Amino acid sequence: MKYFKRESYLQKIRGFYDEAEIIKVITGVRRCGKSSLMQTIADEISEKGIAQENIIYLNLDKRGYRSVKSPEQLEKIIDENSKASGLKYLFIDEVQNVKDFEEVLNEYRDDGEFSIFITGSNSYLLSGELITKLTGRYIEFEMFPLNFNEYIEMKKFFKKNVSANLLEEFDNYLIEGGFPKAIQFDSIQDKRTYISSVISEIFEKDIKRRVKIKNTSVFNKVQQYLINNFGSTTSLTNMLSDLEKSGMKIKRETLNRYIKILCDSKVLYECERFDLKSRKSISGEKKYYLSDLGFYYATNTDNRINYGPVMENLTYVYARGNNYSVSVGRIGKFECDFILRKNNSDYSYIQVCMTMMASTETEEREYKPLETIKDNFPKYILTRSDPIQHRNGIIHKNMPELMKNGELF
């Protein structure tokens, strides 16, 4: 089977293909394309001339491997497939299905004869607990659903119609989201039915098996509240108040726990606020963004695009997918939509809005926070389809072209 190549991720991993001392961990929200990426890696290794018997691929969610639950069973099946000499490439998909899998991986890594790749969607694998169990070195490669350029290229890959109007395609992407499988469905209703099933699958396989949810209906209401309010500045106090107004009383610690569960399973991402003057994070108010906008449109009947939060969400995920740390900025009385950091020292600043053409006040509102920042790091304003402006060294880009071209900040 031929797989669509997610080149931006392959570039990050290729340098570690033959590395036996480092376990390669591919994480991301369920159904974002981790298994296909790992299959692509296995294919590339095979294309380098590596014998097939040196490539061991175990998908623990597939027939024939679902009964593998214990370390002993996993070790047995690896040994049965490891008769070849020389470096062997071990791929394990949905590794969290095996209890205490870390012990087995540590043993094979210590052998020095295996280059190990693993994927998983379970919240345990995604929550950062892995570092305490995988002794020695491992690298996490975080995947996201398709970005805009990948969305267009995958539509071509599956021979789907791609509009010649980039803006029309951009709006389609905002509503449909970036789950790879959804592209294969023609109707918007089928796409949304599929994404709704992904949400259910995340709960059943990644949350319910990992943590105990005493009241499922309350958890679902909290999940829907956060999905519906993505991109809004909020705090636990505000959320508790809003939920109580809707008739649902919930303890503060329970709400905090539910948010952590949704972040661990990569449904949500928490974006902290950062004060530019003190260079410190601001406690309290935060924003939450969706790993994919399809989560919102699949659970709501409204097809209208609220471009403000939607374009913010898109920018956040795009930046994270390009290895930036992201926070919401405050500069005195002004807010900056995003502060991006790379290598902990290089900053860039971003304002996002649908258009600055609505009024002079809108234009001033977008430029003023960036003009207040006195350092020489790059400053950007991202819009949907405005005529490009030039003002005080601030870089103005339209988001469809920027993301289609894979530009960085």
Image (cartoon, grey):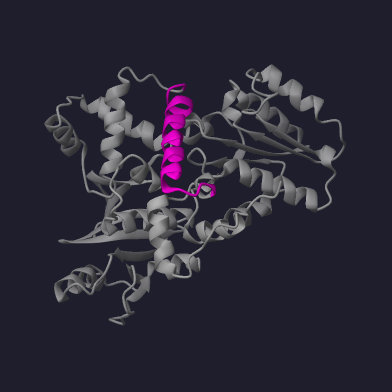
Q: Looking at this view, is 174 or 282 the one in front?
A: 174
Measured along the vertical axis of the image, is residue 321 above or below residue 226?
Answer: below
Whether residue 2 sits left or right of residue 301 in the image: it is right
* Residue at 84% in and 51% down: 49
Image quarter where the C terminus lies is bottom left
Locate residue 141, reporting x and y percent: 55, 46
Prevailing secondary structure of the magenta residues: helix
Locate residue 14, reporting x and y percent: 67, 53
Magenta span = 184-209
Whether residue 31 sits left or right of residue 354 in the image: it is right
**111 part of magenta stretch:** no
Locate residue 218, reporting x and y percent: 27, 24
* Residue at 64% in and 22% down: 66
- In this view of the protein, can residue 346 be seen by the observer? no
Quarter of image, res 332: bottom left
Measured along the vertical axis of the image, is residue 205 above or below residue 375?
Answer: above
**186 part of magenta stretch:** yes
- In this view of the protein, can residue 290 be seen by the observer? yes
Determine the residue located farthest toward the left in the rendered image. 245
